[in-house]
Image (tube, grey):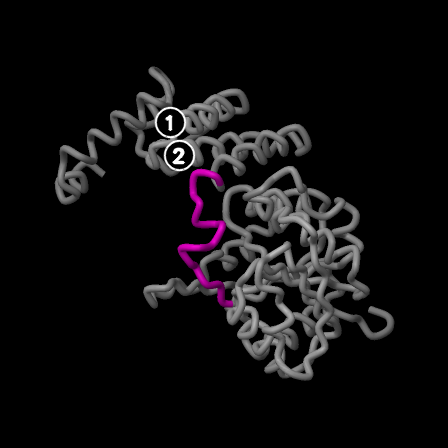
Amino acid sequence: MTGALTIGVLITYYGERELLHECLESLQQQTQPVDEILVYDDASDAPPDSYIPDGMSVKVLRGATNRGPAHGRNQLLAASTTDYVHFHDADDVFAPEWHARVRSEIEQQDVDAVFTEVDAVRETGADSPRVLGLQSLIGTRDLLRFCINGVMLVPAGTYRRDRVLGIDGYRTTLWQSEDFDFHVRLAATGITYAVIPESLVTIRVRAASRSQQHVEALANYVRAVGLLAKELPIEYIGDLADSAARAGSRLHALGAKTEASEAFKLAQRLGPPRFTTQRRAYRVIASTIGFQNAENIAGLYRRLLPSRVRQLFA
């Protein structure tokens, strides 16, 4: 790279209060300071100014109405002045070496994006380390397929700002699962990237988080799959069919039968899906008498047979 690159942290906020303070404190504790910090207040009833550590340089933008994180991230993107941007939720925290490690990768490799692993901590205290499984991405080097079939969370990535502007940022018509859609669209442009397999960000899984509204999140995920199917190369349509089918199975298990039906219809239209994570019996039933019937039979099977008995037929 020529010249000194700059990296900004763009934080969406909606009443996280003290959690924002902890997030910003983790930025204060970086071994190498970031170049810019922006916070977008999505019309919350607890303005973030009271939760910014004393003396910390943070620019706050405020929306007049609550429009969701996709809109907020696009506002932050438009206001940012740095070469690279990192989107972040207000309740998540950074490891002290996050910025130095990410900056070093960009300076050494001149890539469009750097992805780091993420740890998850629940309110119960339970930890889930390295939730993304980025080690497998190092082996496959197919970022687009990874983003379709796996999970790429918002705080995992730091991106060249021009590449994000090139896809017009986030799709604001999606209230949930906008991060899935964003990463798939960005990967489809053929960006260059580096992977840091160590966890440098910790996300907090809270009951009050939008991501815990599972039916809404999955229904929006299915909408995103339908939109992406019109945009991606034909060789990835089978992966999208599988994604829609997996979402349908989860929706069915949650009792959202109408949403599950829509997901299965989309999967069939794109596929048929391969159901690679399901047993052969499920795949046969789904292909002959339909996805909903396969789910009903699978649910009955799980209710009637203890898990130790089911393992004999695995």
Task: State which region is magenta.
Answer: 202-216
Q: Amino acid at mark 1?
A: Lys
Location of residue 45 with respect to 281 vertically, above or below: below
Q: CA distance from mark 1 to mark 2?
A: 7 Å
Residue at point 48%, 39% (across, down): 216
**Residue 53 seen:** yes
Residue 160 left/right relative to 174 = right
Front residue of 268 and 174: 174
Q: Secondary structure at mark 2?
A: helix
Q: What residue is disc 1 on?
A: 257
Location of residue 148 with respect to 283 vertically, above or below: below
Image x and y of residue 139, in percent = 54, 55
Residue at point 55%, 44% (across, down): 177
Local crowd size for mark 1, using a 10 Å CA cut-off: few (<14), some (14–19), many (≥20): some
Front residue of 92 and 298: 92
Front residue of 189 and 25: 25
Checking the image for residue 251, the label placed there is 2
Image x and y of residue 92, in percent = 53, 66
Query: Is there a contact, CB below 8 Å, between mark 1 and mark 2?
Result: yes
